[in-house]
Amino acid sequence: MSRRRRSKITLLRRISQGFFLFLFVAIFLRTTLIGEDDTSGLASLFLDLDPLVLLTTFLASGTIVKGMLLALITVAITLLLGRVFCSWVCPLGTTFNLVSWLRREPAKSRLRTGVWNRWMRSKYLVLIAVLAAALTGLHLAGILDPIPLFYRTMTTSIYPAFVWGTDTLFTWLYNWDPGIGAIRITLLSEPVYAFLRAHALPYDPIVFRGGVLVGLFFTGLAGLALVRFRFWCRYICPLGALLGICAKAMPLEVHNDPDLCIDCGACVLDCHGGCDPHLPGKWKQEECFVCFNCRDRCPVEAISFRWRLLGRTHTLLPPLPGRAVKAGEEIADA
């Protein structure tokens, strides 16, 4: 089986993932732990783009903060293009995506675990629980919504651990000061530490009660990403469930040409959402992250992306040029 090719559109997706993850961390550092305590404007950008935060806030209080109307942009894009937020924007999804790629799972096993299964419906039950709790005034979205969850983890666990580790390392280097003759390690370490103090470390020491518990919870979720690709996104994420419901109306579709498909299963290997692109006519659009990996993987030019508008079909992305593959050819471990 041919190795995965990367098209320009998937390269663009990776750039988008990296950009939004960097932006999330940069906003976090600037507004939360470096001396600026502003919670408006740019600081709340990701929360404002989150439609689950908008919906649960309205259900709990009957009010909507003006900035949260940005979430309607996310909804509109989802209605048009599907769950692109999950695979192109969400910083927590990107983080668990990176963790998942650390797995060393044989391709044949990924064929078995990469397809849709009934347990993926569980995230819709989580969504129902979050919405029901909001009606009683209980904000479970603050715990289970990916944006507040990631922000809370950064605030109470990841960042304090980073600060402690950085201070400990550079203090040890300063006290020990190894080197050769007049060339000492502090000639390099002290300017680096000064830069970090100015741009990435807080003015005062920070300690949050419950930080260890939050860190363990997040570590557990990351561990699940090693067990099953993007476990959180497929099985737990209530925001993903909400966007999946919206995606049911999108006019974009994955088209697997049954006359060309050789049922090799290659399109399943790197599928982010487990949307079954390998089954012609049975693709699950509510689970599709629009990552385009299935199109990149297909060796026989069977998969394309099409629009269904006003009863007519238009090709948005044609298949990538493939190579001749015999039916039943064994999939090489990736």
Image (cartoon, rainbow, N blue to C red):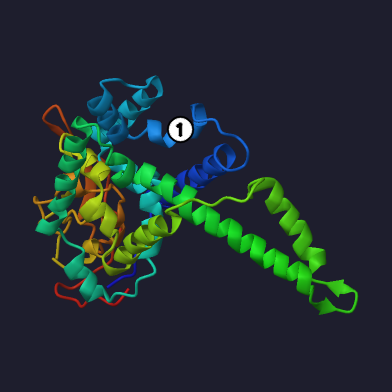
Location of residue 280 in the rendering, given as x and y in whole percent from the top left corner: 10, 54
Location of residue 63 in the rendering, given as x and y in whole percent from the top left corner: 30, 20
* Quadrant of the image occupied by residue 114: bottom left
224 displayed left or right of 36: left
In front of the other: 305 or 286: 286
144 displayed left or right of 14: left
Q: Residues within 10 Å of mark 1 (few under 14, many from 20)?
A: some
Q: Residue at x 30, y 56 (%)?
A: 293
Q: Residue at x 28, y 55 (%)?
A: 232
Location of residue 296 in the rendering, given as x and y in whole percent from the top left corner: 31, 58
Three-letter amino acid code of the residue under disc 1: Ser
Residue 6 makes an appearance in the image: no
The residue carrying mark 1 is 44
In front of the other: 141 or 104: 141
Q: Secondary structure at mark 1?
A: helix
Examine the rendered structure and indicate whether residue 277 appears above or below residue 42.
Answer: below
Which residue is at the far front?
Answer: 209
Task: Tally the marks.
Answer: 1
* Quadrant of the image occupied by residue 116: bottom left
Which residue is at the far right?
Answer: 182
Q: Residue at x 15, y 45 (%)?
A: 124
Q: Quadrant of the N terminus?
A: bottom left
Location of residue 92 in the rendering, given as x and y in whole percent from the top left corner: 38, 50
Q: Quadrant of the C terminus?
A: bottom left
In front of the other: 288 or 202: 202
Examine the rendered structure and indicate whether residue 135 appears above or below residue 16.
Answer: above
271 displayed left or right of 27: left
Residue 159 makes an appearance in the image: yes
